[in-house]
Amino acid sequence: MRRLSAVFVLLTAVLGGLLTGASAAHASPPVCRPSRADPPTPAVICTVPVDTDGLRIDFITWTKDDKAIPDTDDIRSISVPCTPGETFEIGVTVGFIDEVDQNTGSTQVTCPGKPLKLTYFDCDTGASLLVCSVTFEGGTPPVTASWNINGAERPDLLNNTVIRTGCVVGKPYRAVVTVRDRFDTLTSVQSATCTKKQQ
């Protein structure tokens, strides 16, 4: 009877392994980033996640908003054309050789616009005032401009492209503007001495 019970336990374990797979794969989302094509093209590059538990890949399928993406089967990295500002979901299913379970994951993506670029940044002083101006173009929303004056963050100046703030005549100042969009961060610095008269 004991031997019969042991055989039954062994058969149960083997059958359980066949049904569930030797090592179940993790559900991992695809990794997506803006296309860096030159000239700039509105598209995202999506790649199969690296973590496949060392399993050999049998097949790959891709979807955009739950609809199959043509001509992308079995490709590890794909380019998805899109409209700047468009938000959509990219899904990937990865099947493995000798493995019952599949790796299925998805991620929300926002189509990039033109690359973010700082086009102008300058500061001037006069009448004990520091005046700075910044301009930029491109970027994928949301785009923000933040300011740091003499090492202090200035949330009151957030998203202003022209700022005016007091400075001490004869003392140095350091103005840092940081412009961010969904994908990039650009920083520029201006340093000089505060003056009473405009330069």
Image (spheres, helix red, strand yellow):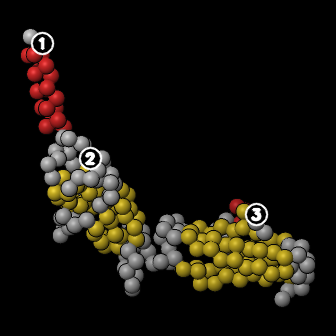
Mark 1 crowdedness (10 Å alpha carbons): few <14, some 14-19, many ≥20: few
Assign the C terminus to one quadrant of the image: bottom right
Which is nearer the N-term, disc 2 or disc 1? 1
Residue 44: image tag? none
The residue pinned by badge 1 equals 2
Considering depth in this image, is 176 or 136 the residue closer to the camera?
176
Label 1–label 3 contact, CB within 8 A: no
**What amino acid is at disc 3?**
Ala
The residue pinned by badge 3 equals 152
Q: Secondary structure at mark 2?
A: loop
Considering depth in this image, is 6 or 120 the residue closer to the camera?
6
Left-right relation of 164 to 119:
right
**What amino acid is at disc 1?**
Arg
Which is nearer the N-term, disc 3 or disc 2? 2
Q: Is residue 146 visible to the viewer in this orientation of the structure?
A: yes
Assign the N terminus to one quadrant of the image: top left
Q: CA distance from mark 2 to mark 1?
A: 36 Å
Figure check: 96 above or below 7:
below
**What amino acid is at disc 2?**
Ala
Q: Position of residue 48 (x, y in %)?
A: 29, 61
Figure check: 122 above or below 35:
below
Which is nearer the N-term, disc 1 or disc 3? 1
Q: Secondary structure at mark 3?
A: strand
The residue pinned by badge 2 equals 25
Mark 2 crowdedness (10 Å alpha carbons): few <14, some 14-19, many ≥20: many
The quadrant in which residue 11 appears is top left
Label 3–label 2 contact, CB within 8 A: no
